[in-house]
Image (tube, helix red, strand yellow):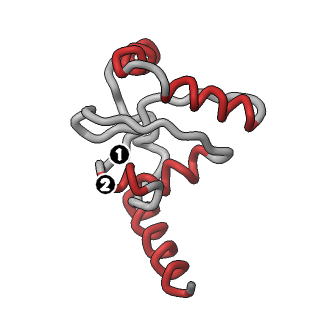
């Protein structure tokens, strides 16, 4: 995930990428992504097995910043949000409201 200026990146692991991206886009993904407005999906990998995915996440998090950007640019040279057409603005707003109700009910 990255911000609109492509100055910060976030690497994470999930078993449901669409749900997780929606969480990030609504500001409920993580404290880090919320703080830096990381809403754009620039790159992702599909990996079999949660432990393999966690191992890959750790590997990428240990890479130098330039290595990460080279990996992203190899697959997405325009640095476009790969999830731009996954959700409508209405779906994002609806999900925000659902999350507010869930938090209120706690």
**Vertical position of residue 60 compared to residue 75: above or below:** below
| Mark 1 residue element | loop
Q: As drawn, which residue projects farthest toward the front?
A: 62
Instruction: Determine which residue is flagged by label 1.
Output: 38
**Vertical position of residue 82 compared to residue 94: above or below:** above
Q: Horizontal placement of 3 versus 101: left or right?
A: left
Badge 2: residue crowd in 10 Å (few <14, some 14–19, many ≥20) = few
- Separation of residues labelled 1 and 2 (CA atoms): 8 Å
| Mark 2 residue element | helix
Circle on res. 23: none
Q: Residue at x 44, y 34 (%)?
A: 82
Q: Residue at x 48, y 36 (%)?
A: 11
Q: As drawn, which residue projects farthest toward the bottom?
A: 105
Q: Residue at x 36, y 22 (%)?
A: 65
Q: Horizontal placement of 11 versus 35: left or right?
A: right
Residue 21: x percent and y percent?
A: 50, 48
Circle on res. 35: 2
**Vertical position of residue 34 compared to residue 51: above or below:** below
Q: Horizontal placement of 94 versus 78: left or right?
A: right
């Amino acid at each position: 995930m990255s911000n609109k200026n492509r100055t910060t990146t976030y690497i994470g692991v999930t078993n449901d990428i669409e749900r997780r991206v929606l969480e990030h886009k609504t500001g409920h993904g993580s404290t880090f992504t919320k703080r830096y407005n990381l809403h754009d999906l620039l790159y992702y990998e599909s990996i079999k097995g949660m432990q393999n995915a966690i191992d890959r996440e750790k590997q990428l998090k240990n890479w130098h910043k330039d290595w990460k950007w080279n990996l992203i640019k190899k697959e997405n040279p325009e640095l476009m949000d790969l999830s731009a057409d996954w959700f409508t603005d209405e779906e994002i707003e609806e999900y925000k409201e659902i999350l507010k109700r869930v938090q209120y009910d706690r």
